Image (tube, helix red, strand yellow):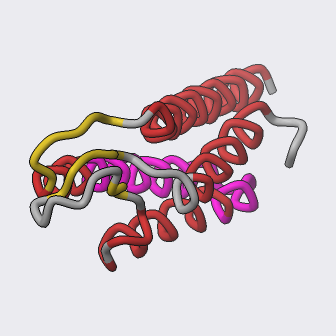
Protein backbone atom coordinates (compact mmCIF):
# COMPACT_ATOMS: atom_id res chain seq x y z
CA UNK A 1 0.00 0.00 0.00
CA UNK A 2 2.53 2.66 1.03
CA UNK A 3 5.31 1.18 -1.08
CA UNK A 4 3.52 2.46 -4.17
CA UNK A 5 4.49 6.02 -5.08
CA UNK A 6 0.91 7.07 -5.77
CA UNK A 7 0.08 6.36 -2.13
CA UNK A 8 2.71 8.92 -1.14
CA UNK A 9 1.26 11.45 -3.59
CA UNK A 10 -2.25 10.86 -2.23
CA UNK A 11 -1.03 11.23 1.35
CA UNK A 12 0.69 14.51 0.50
CA UNK A 13 -2.47 15.77 -1.23
CA UNK A 14 -4.51 14.88 1.83
CA UNK A 15 -2.05 16.63 4.17
CA UNK A 16 -2.10 19.76 1.99
CA UNK A 17 -5.88 19.69 1.90
CA UNK A 18 -6.20 19.53 5.67
CA UNK A 19 -3.48 22.20 6.02
CA UNK A 20 -5.62 24.59 4.01
CA UNK A 21 -8.17 24.47 6.83
CA UNK A 22 -5.63 26.25 9.01
CA UNK A 23 -3.87 28.63 6.64
CA UNK A 24 -5.43 31.64 4.84
CA UNK A 25 -5.91 31.92 1.09
CA UNK A 26 -6.36 35.68 0.71
CA UNK A 27 -5.59 38.70 2.88
CA UNK A 28 -6.75 42.27 2.51
CA UNK A 29 -9.24 44.94 3.47
CA UNK A 30 -12.83 43.76 3.38
CA UNK A 31 -15.83 45.86 2.32
CA UNK A 32 -16.53 46.93 5.90
CA UNK A 33 -13.08 48.54 6.05
CA UNK A 34 -11.43 46.08 8.40
CA UNK A 35 -7.74 45.83 7.41
CA UNK A 36 -5.82 42.55 7.55
CA UNK A 37 -8.90 40.40 7.11
CA UNK A 38 -8.21 36.91 5.85
CA UNK A 39 -10.13 34.43 3.75
CA UNK A 40 -9.64 30.83 4.79
CA UNK A 41 -11.61 27.60 4.57
CA UNK A 42 -13.36 28.14 7.89
CA UNK A 43 -15.00 31.39 6.72
CA UNK A 44 -17.70 29.81 4.54
CA UNK A 45 -19.62 26.56 4.84
CA UNK A 46 -19.04 25.51 1.23
CA UNK A 47 -15.29 25.97 1.60
CA UNK A 48 -15.26 23.75 4.69
CA UNK A 49 -17.33 21.03 3.00
CA UNK A 50 -15.22 20.93 -0.18
CA UNK A 51 -11.92 21.03 1.71
CA UNK A 52 -12.87 18.19 4.05
CA UNK A 53 -14.34 16.18 1.17
CA UNK A 54 -11.11 16.45 -0.81
CA UNK A 55 -8.97 15.54 2.20
CA UNK A 56 -11.06 12.54 3.22
CA UNK A 57 -11.49 11.29 -0.35
CA UNK A 58 -7.77 11.38 -1.08
CA UNK A 59 -7.00 9.70 2.23
CA UNK A 60 -9.53 6.93 1.63
CA UNK A 61 -8.34 6.45 -1.93
CA UNK A 62 -5.02 5.18 -0.60
CA UNK A 63 -6.78 2.11 0.77
CA UNK A 64 -8.45 1.27 -2.56
CA UNK A 65 -5.13 0.03 -3.96
CA UNK A 66 -6.64 -3.28 -5.11
CA UNK A 67 -9.07 -1.55 -7.49
CA UNK A 68 -7.09 0.90 -9.60
CA UNK A 69 -10.10 1.84 -11.76
CA UNK A 70 -12.05 3.15 -8.79
CA UNK A 71 -8.92 4.89 -7.53
CA UNK A 72 -8.62 6.81 -10.79
CA UNK A 73 -12.31 7.82 -10.63
CA UNK A 74 -12.00 9.04 -7.04
CA UNK A 75 -8.86 11.02 -7.83
CA UNK A 76 -10.47 12.57 -10.91
CA UNK A 77 -13.45 13.54 -8.76
CA UNK A 78 -11.12 15.06 -6.19
CA UNK A 79 -9.41 17.05 -8.93
CA UNK A 80 -12.78 18.41 -10.08
CA UNK A 81 -13.69 19.30 -6.48
CA UNK A 82 -10.34 21.06 -6.06
CA UNK A 83 -10.92 23.11 -9.22
CA UNK A 84 -14.38 24.07 -7.94
CA UNK A 85 -12.83 24.97 -4.57
CA UNK A 86 -10.26 27.25 -6.22
CA UNK A 87 -13.06 28.96 -8.16
CA UNK A 88 -15.04 29.42 -4.93
CA UNK A 89 -12.02 30.95 -3.21
CA UNK A 90 -11.54 33.30 -6.14
CA UNK A 91 -15.20 34.34 -6.01
CA UNK A 92 -15.11 34.89 -2.26
CA UNK A 93 -11.96 36.98 -2.61
CA UNK A 94 -14.16 39.48 -4.47
CA UNK A 95 -15.60 40.47 -1.08
CA UNK A 96 -12.40 42.39 -0.40
CA UNK A 97 -11.82 45.92 -1.65
CA UNK A 98 -8.07 45.41 -1.87
CA UNK A 99 -5.66 42.69 -0.94
CA UNK A 100 -3.40 39.92 -2.17
CA UNK A 101 -3.15 36.15 -2.32
CA UNK A 102 -1.15 34.66 0.54
CA UNK A 103 1.82 32.36 -0.06
CA UNK A 104 -0.08 29.46 1.53
CA UNK A 105 -2.65 29.61 -1.26
CA UNK A 106 -0.14 27.60 -3.29
CA UNK A 107 -1.23 24.53 -1.31
CA UNK A 108 -4.19 24.27 -3.68
CA UNK A 109 -1.90 24.03 -6.67
CA UNK A 110 0.17 21.41 -4.84
CA UNK A 111 -2.99 19.37 -4.24
CA UNK A 112 -3.74 19.37 -7.97
CA UNK A 113 -0.14 18.47 -8.76
CA UNK A 114 -0.07 15.59 -6.25
CA UNK A 115 -3.38 14.24 -7.55
CA UNK A 116 -2.10 14.39 -11.13
CA UNK A 117 1.07 12.53 -10.12
CA UNK A 118 -1.02 9.91 -8.32
CA UNK A 119 -3.11 9.27 -11.43
CA UNK A 120 0.08 8.98 -13.44
CA UNK A 121 1.41 6.37 -11.00
CA UNK A 122 -1.82 4.37 -11.14
CA UNK A 123 -1.82 4.41 -14.94
CA UNK A 124 1.79 3.21 -14.86
CA UNK A 125 0.76 0.36 -12.53
CA UNK A 126 -2.07 -0.59 -14.91
CA UNK A 127 0.39 -0.71 -17.76
CA UNK A 128 2.75 -2.99 -15.82
CA UNK A 129 -0.09 -5.34 -14.83
CA UNK A 130 -1.35 -5.56 -18.43
CA UNK A 131 2.15 -6.30 -19.70
CA UNK A 132 2.68 -9.00 -17.07
CA UNK A 133 -0.68 -10.58 -17.93
CA UNK A 134 0.26 -10.62 -21.58
CA UNK A 135 3.49 -12.47 -20.83
CA UNK A 136 1.72 -15.26 -18.93
Residue 66: quarter of image: bottom right
Q: Is residue 76 left or right of residue 113?
A: left
Specify whether residue 81 is painted magenta. yes
Start-end of magenta stretch? 60-86
Asked if residue 81 shows in the view, the reply is: no
Q: Residue at x 45, y 36 (%)?
A: 112
- Which residue appears farthest toward the bottom when viewing the image? 45
Q: Nearer the viewer, residue 122 or 101?
A: 101
Up/down of 20 relative to 50, above or below: above
Residue shown at the point (41%, 36%) measured from the top left? 102
Magenta residue check for 101: no
Q: Name the residue: 35% across, 67% down.
A: 47
Q: Position of residue 38 (x, y in %)?
A: 36, 55
- In this picture, is 38 found above or below 4? below
Q: Where is residue 113 shown, x and y percent of the image?
A: 50, 29
12 horizontally vs 91: left or right: right
In front here: 61 or 59? 59
**Residue 48 at x, y = what percent?**
42, 72
Q: Horizontal placement of 100 versus 110: left or right?
A: left
Give the main secondary structure of the magenta stretch: helix
Residue nearest the viewer, comparing 89 with 136: 89
Q: Along the line of sight, which residue is nearer the eye, 5 or 126?
A: 5
Task: Give the quarter of the image for residue 33.
Answer: bottom left
Amino acid sequence: MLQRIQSVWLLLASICSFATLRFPFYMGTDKTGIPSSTLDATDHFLLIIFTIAIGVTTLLTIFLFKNRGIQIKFIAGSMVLECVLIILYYNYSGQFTEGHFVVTSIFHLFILLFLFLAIRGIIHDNKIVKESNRLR
